[in-house]
Image (cartoon, rainbow, N blue to C red):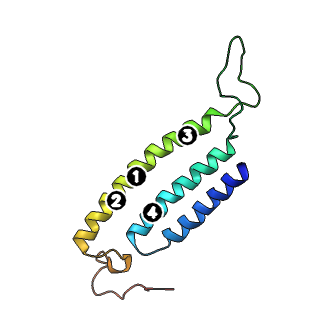
Amino acid sequence: MDHALALLAGLFIAVAIYLLLSRSLIRMLLGLVLLGNGINLMILAGGRLSRIVPPIVLGDAVAPAADAANPLPQALILTAIVIGFAMFSFLLVLSWRAYHRLDADNTDHMRVAEPPGRPDPPMSY
């Protein structure tokens, strides 16, 4: 199970990097979401994903059982999901406004911040 989860996280991150290197704003936003999900899966896989024993201390025990799931990665992932959704919502509205204001989705066509009269920056490398 851990190998499949690690492979899925690696696939998410690889696709996210490919989408982030695109020039389209929508692809960049989707790449950002996939990157966040891939990192969350990596944290989950590193936190001993198991169904054996819940992370609850029962009775007079001082600590949970040795093979219990670690609750810290789960709490971190829950926080990261909320923050990632808020960031995605903000960037989606920002890109929507930029699209309507500049009438372009391609970042190469959004060069209105470049000073006039100067040489154009390279369009490709």
What element does badge 2 sit on? helix
Identify residue type, mark 4: Leu
Identify residue type, mark 1: Met
Q: Is residue 48 above or below residue 13?
A: above
Q: Is residue 73 above or below residue 21?
A: above
Asked whether disc 4 touches disc 1, contact meaning CB atoms under 8 Å apart, the reply is no
Circle nearer the viewer, 4 or 1: 4
User: In the drawing, what numbered circle is on residue 76?
Assistant: 3
Identify residue type, mark 3: Leu
Q: Residue at x 71, y 21 (%)?
A: 63
Quarter residue 77 falls in? top right
Identify residue type, mark 2: Leu
User: In the rendered image, which residue does mark 2 sit on?
Assistant: 92
Calculate the distance from the C-alpha at mark 1 to the C-alpha at mark 3. 16 Å
What element does badge 4 sit on? helix
Q: Residues within 10 Å of mark 2 (few under 14, many from 20)?
A: some
